[in-house]
């Protein structure tokens, strides 16, 4: 199933078991008429690190050999370090026009919201129904906050007990907003504010509840 965050994006995350993910990858490669000579795969028996990304970047801007496009694939089934993701983010912000970037993973838990917001998500996970339900719940809550149908201070209190609780909560809102950008472009500004608060809470010792209250009162 496709979850289109933004039709203009050429970067993808395929979520699911490795066999199903690779089947979908093969379909994408075939649909875009990409030769096997123009598919670059980065894999590792541990979390993808900064050195893997640096090596990938060296080859990223090389022109395709036999096709109009090439595919750069990251198999991130053992995760991806935060340092590597921050470096990879620069690639996602300005990817070569001739390159399709694909991340294969079995979980979104380790992926930064800034990465998620720049990728289309293809969910082939067996848990997709449960995940879809969570996305809809978070989107409904986000819309209620925006429409003033719930007390934002109560929401902040319930989800601002500690840093990790707040981060998990904000990640859910970010994913929900990401997946509905194509249907509601106005969510783009909301998404940026949520991401800013997420980064603030994650990287500083700010009062978590205060940060959430400030976010919700200014959406």
Image: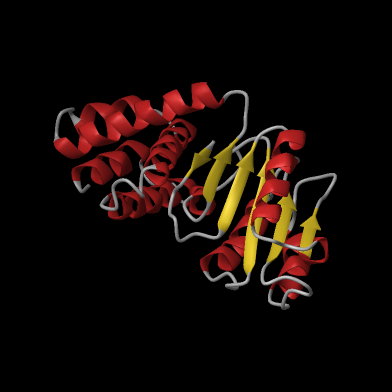
Q: Does the rendering let one see residue 3?
A: yes
Q: Residue at x 44, y 56 (%)?
A: 7
Picture residue at 29% right of the left edge, 30% below the top: 140
Where's residue 105, x and y in %?
Answer: 68, 41
Q: Is residue 121 above or below residue 41?
A: above
Q: Which residue is nearer to you in this view: 72 or 31?
A: 31
**Residue 98, above or below 216:** below
Which of the pair 182/55 is nearer the observer? 182
On screen, residue 167 versus residue 59, left or right, reads left
Q: Residue at x 71, y 43 (%)?
A: 79
Q: Among all residues in the image, which is located at the extreme right?
A: 45
Where is residue 128? Give x, y as percent.
Answer: 55, 27
Placement of 149 over or under 91, stated as above or below: above
Q: In the visual, does 213 lie left or right of 91?
A: left
Task: Report if residue 160 is visible in the image.
Answer: no
Q: How is the image coloured?
A: secondary structure
Q: In the image, residue 78 lies at what x, y percent?
A: 75, 41
Of residues 27 and 121, the one nearer the viewer is 27
Locate the N terminus by quadrant.
Answer: top right
């Amino acid at each position: 199933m496709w979850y289109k965050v933004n039709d203009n994006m050429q970067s993808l995350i395929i979520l699911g078991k490795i066999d199903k993910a690779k089947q979908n990858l093969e379909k994408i490669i075939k649909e875009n008429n990409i030769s096997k000579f123009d598919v670059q795969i980065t894999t590792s028996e541990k979390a993808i690190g900064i050195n893997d990304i640096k090596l990938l970047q060296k080859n990223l801007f090389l022109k395709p050999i036999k096709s109009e496009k090439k595919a750069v694939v990251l198999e991130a089934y053992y995760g991806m370090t935060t340092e590597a993701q921050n470096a990879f983010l620069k690639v996602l912000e300005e990817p070569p026009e001739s390159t399709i970037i694909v991340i294969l993973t079995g979980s979104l838990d380790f992926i930064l919201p800034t990465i998620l917001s720049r990728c289309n998500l293809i969910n082939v996970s067996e848990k997709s129904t449960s995940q879809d339900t969570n996305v809809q719940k978070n989107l409904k809550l986000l819309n209620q906050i925006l429409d003033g149908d719930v007390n934002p201070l109560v929401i902040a209190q319930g989800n601002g007990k500690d840093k990790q609780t707040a981060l998990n909560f904000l990640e859910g809102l970010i994913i929900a907003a990401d997946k509905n950008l194509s249907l509601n472009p106005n969510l783009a500004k909301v998404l940026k504010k949520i991401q800013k608060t997420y980064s603030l809470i994650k990287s500083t010792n700010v009062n978590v509840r205060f940060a959430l209250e400030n976010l919700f009162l200014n959406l």
